[in-house]
Image (tube, rainbow, N blue to C red):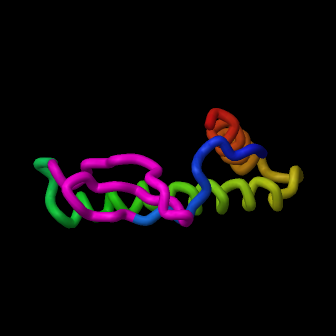
Amino acid sequence: MNTKHTPGPWKFAHGQNDLLTAPDGDDVAAVDVWFSHRSKAEQAANAALIRKAPELLAALRWALDNMGDDLDPDHQEAKQHATNLVNSL
């Protein structure tokens, strides 16, 4: 599976613009999760989820690669849903 996004791990650099940065220090995206009516805890959780996106995708790809095909129908449906999601990226 090809990766079209900037490889992680990403980090947040807080400043006037909240920037996601790549391991090489280049900017990935500017994300303003802190300017919101949401609670600080929810804003921090949203930022953490965005920051972990590359690692979550890698874990899902690993699970799909290591999951067998001899699955019950519910698990087969979940595997297909996950595969479709990854392929849409």
Q: In the displayed structure, would residue 35 be above or below residue 24?
A: above
Relative image position of residue 46 (x, y in whole percent): 33, 56
Task: Answer whether residue 52 is visible to the viewer in this image.
Answer: no
Q: In the displayed structure, would residue 48 be above or below residue 31?
A: below
Relative image position of residue 33 (x, y in whole percent): 25, 52
Quadrant in which the C terminus is drawn: top right
Task: Tell how many labels.
Answer: 0
Q: Residue at x 43, y 65 (%)?
A: 11
Q: Is residue 23 left or right of residue 73?
A: left
Task: Answer whether residue 84 is visible to the viewer in this image.
Answer: yes
Residue 6 lies in the magenta-colored region? no
Relative image position of residue 56 (x, y in whole percent): 57, 59
Q: In the displayed structure, would residue 23 be above or below residue 65?
A: below
Q: Residue at x 25, y 52 (%)?
A: 17
Quadrant in which the N terminus is drawn: top right
Q: Residue at x 40, y 56 (%)?
A: 20
Q: Residue at x 46, y 50 (%)?
A: 28
The part of the image, by quadrant, that contains residue 43 is bottom left
For the residue pair 85 and 78, the one nearer the viewer reads as: 85
Q: Main secondary structure of the magenta part?
A: loop
Q: Which residues are magenta?
A: 12-35
For the residue pair 12 and 68, the one nearer the viewer reads as: 12
Q: Is residue 36 left or right of residue 84?
A: left
Relative image position of residue 87 (x, y in whole percent): 69, 37
Q: Most extreme residue toward the top, as rendered? A: 88
